[in-house]
Amino acid sequence: MIPHRAAVHNGRASDLAIGAPWSRPGSAFAASPFAASQWAEAMVSWLPLHHDMGLVGCLFLCLTRGLDLWLLNPTTFLARPKLWLENLGRHGRCFAPAPNFGYQLCVERLSPEDLAGLDLSSWRAAMTGAEMVRPETVRDFLELTAGTGFRPEAFRPCYGLAEGTLAVTFDAKGQGLRTLPLPAGADSGLGLAEVACVGEPVTDTEVRIAAPDGSSLAPGKIGEVQVRGPSVFAGYYNDREATADTLVDGWLHTGDLGFLEGGELYLTGRTKDVLILHGHNLMPHELEWLAESAVGGGGAQRCGAFSIARGAAGEEPIVVLEVERADSETLAAIEHDVRQRIGRALSLPLADVVFVRRGKIPKTTSGKVQRRQLRQLYLDGELERLS
Amino acid sequence: MNADDKKHVATEVLAEISGNAKDEIRPEMDLVADLGIDSPKALQLLVALEDRLEIEISDEEAAKLNTVGDIYAFLGAA
């Protein structure tokens, strides 16, 4: 549940964060409720409106700031990504947010020749958030758009989540992508060599990094990102238990891992089991139920799903299944069945299907699969695969 | 264009999008499970087929295409 005041606050916070670089230091320009319309005329988006970035970041912002909103159907963008860029070159001074995946799709599908004649110099801010910002994607996108007048400093990494209405931190410096080398202790399964700075907390908002025991950590130390401020949500609808776990003494426990450096946030992983694929969150049990249905379920949970990233393409799902000893032919048949069930239901190819003996998937005493531990075993090459 | 030509174009497009060689593409292959075609790639596939074969594929028809063979059969009937 997002209180109205949180939605209003987040809009204003985004305004200040995006508007600041175009105003003189100390001027009232950035604080004006109509600031955004003075430096941009339109937004061009393909984000679905049920996505927090699409609903709050595009629709709400345009409605309250008097910007034109040019909305592409998400499917149209996936089919013809060039249309997004063409429209960005057509509607005056504009901005557009997208998850890393959107920029990556342009990089994979388009060549500089495809963009010949396109003028992207009026694209003021290209926000990137809602999933891990991948430095190689940003660089490839800059190479792709080098001939269009698109400015590298238009890239605005940001961090937000629905439980925080949307924006939590925002790159307010307007210097484009800034990175630090991947620190020790960061998640090795995200395929990152360096981490992108996602900026400083938006106005009236505090961000702290907490150790598992709840204490605040010093700059540079990795822990859970926690957020407090007027944009933080009121709780999950009809779910007191989940609310109590997430909202503690006014602090939103995001489940994301990261560190602060120079007052700015860098993300390094997450504590939650959710899979983030193409900027879309997927719960692991959606995959696990489908995989288990291929081996007949049978009561006890025998499957664990998680995602890892190997490169710019982003996170890919992996399924680990416990089986009775079986010959390789049977295993190959089960693997195909699992891939087909998940493929048909979710249009999701699996990066890997791993078979292990019964009892090899780490579980809690109550029988719940410990997915983070399972994922670490996989990353460390310590799962004994049956083949 | 006859059915064989259409099949040939479809195989070419499938190879291009999945990163497989043309002679590895078999009718029994599942688009997602065997060729790794996720939803963005599936749309890329539909657009490429529509553009190169100058046909239209409705959402209802597209939803029924699960295997390489389904695509061949659809093009044969189209």
Image: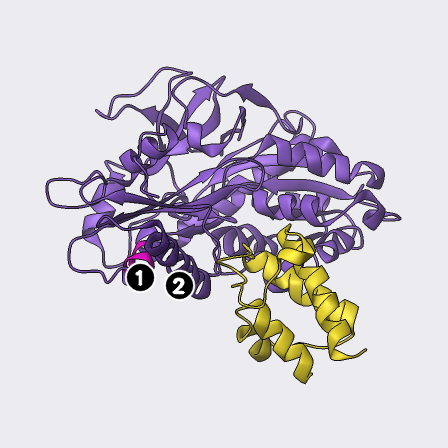
- Chain B palette colour: yellow
Give the magenta part as a residue range.
A288-292
Q: Quadrant of residue A270?
A: top left
Please rate how many residues cluster around mark 1, counting C-alpha atoms within 10 Å: few if below 14, some from 14 to 19, many from 20: some
Camera-side residue of A367 and A88: A367
The kind of secondary structure element at disc 2 is helix
Q: Badge 2 is on which residue?
A: A341
**Which of A124 and A108 lies nearest the eye of the viewer?**
A108
Q: Quadrant of the C terminus of chain A?
A: top left
State left or right for residue A261 relative to residue A313: left
Is A301 placed above or below A340 here? Answer: above
Q: Is residue A290 in the magenta section?
A: yes
Visual colour scheme: by chain
Residue depicted at 29% across the width and 37% down the height = A374
Q: In the rendering, what colour is chain A? A: purple
- Mark 2 vs 1: CB contact within 8 A: yes
Between A229 and A358, which is closer to the camera in this rendering? A358
Picture disc at residue A294 = 1
Specify the subunit that label 2 lies on: A
Q: Position of residue A202 (x, y in %)?
A: 49, 34
Q: Is residue A318 above or below residue B39?
A: above
